[in-house]
Image (spheres, rainbow, N blue to C red):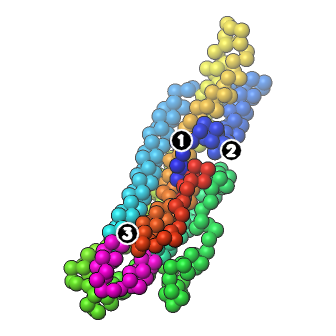
Amino acid sequence: MHAGKKYSFFEFILWTRRDLYRLAILAIIPTVLYHFCNFTFLSISWVPVALLGTAVSFIISFKNNASYARLWEARQIYGGIINVSRAFGVMIRDFLASQDKKEDVKVIFYRHFAWLTALRFQLREPRAWENLNEPANLEYSKNYHTSEKTDKLEEVLAKYLSADELTYILQKKNKATQLMALQSKHINKLFTERNLSDLQLQSLQNSITNFYDNQGKAERIKNFPYPRHFSSIATIMLNLFVFLVPYGLLNDFNKLGTGTLIEGYSIWLNIPFAILLTWVFNSLDVVGESSTNPFEGSANDVPITNISRTIEIDMRDMLDETDLPPALTPENNILM
């Protein structure tokens, strides 16, 4: 997540420079042919192009609203995980305080950190429809570090789990699900040993249910893309509009200089103005596309690594530990 004040204009230009090259070529070719080869038939009426632009603006707006909704829902999911984690930690610590079960409390706490770790690693796994491998995003990703792309899951989990549990979990397909199942099993064992009352067991199991609920919501966003037919039609219509804009402006810019000092030269204004107009539409689409997959590891994602670290610090602080992991800070304004 970009944690700075804003993206600068230069950053936007750098981010979309490959699109700018394409837009420039699309504007230069018809202008050169119109002026030097007298291909006046290339000029088309601006009216249908403007109508298409209106349709494109509605479609892009719809796409951007849907993309923001996915991003905001993802942030709400992790906000829920923060709240339930803190409440879960307090209940485990206080319910077992009088039973002298400090070791059980620590095991449950650290297993929860393992669940947070497994979940964020699962959510960072690539999907075919995600955009992180686009050249512009790959280039920008050099400005920050995504730990899930470089760290090994088994090494991180080893810090939180016993050797037996680690071996068991690494054999499972959905590691986060099975880690929460181990939590439930442990809590029920404590209840069977009469270390928890019925009401305390119910409260803790409600927390387990909430964790599963939030995990399922996050997995739904991760595994269900923005509908491909909506995405495809937006891309097709945008590309068609971008292609037609220089042709629709040819005649108007050619006439612009009539009777003035720039007569015969005003046609060249078609290039910068066509680039500017198409760049605006293209950039709006790029912005929406960058928010469609909020867990892929891009600069505009929900910072699940930072949130997981915050939860770990808070819960270890509940155990009065002093050797707390450092809070994650933005790297070049990017917080992961």
The CA span between labels 2 and 1 is 21 Å
Q: Which residue is mark 3?
A: 85
Front disc: 3 or 2: 3
Q: What x and y, as percent, mark residue 78?
A: 41, 62
Mark closest to the chain's N terminus, 3 or 2: 2
Mark 2 lies on a secondary structure that is helix
Three-letter amino acid code at the position of disc 1: Lys
Q: Find residue 74 and report its image quarter.
A: bottom left
The part of the chain drawn in magenta is: 89-112
Disc 3 crowd rating (10 Å Cα; few below 14, some 14-19, many 20+) is many
Where's the C terminus, which quadrant?
A: bottom right
Q: Earlier in the sequence, mark 2 or mark 1?
A: 1
Residue type highlighted by circle 3: Ser
**37 left or right of 151?**
right
Residue 21 visible here: yes
Residue matched to label 2: 18
Residue 6 got which mark?
1
Q: Nearer the viewer, residue 142 or 308?
A: 308
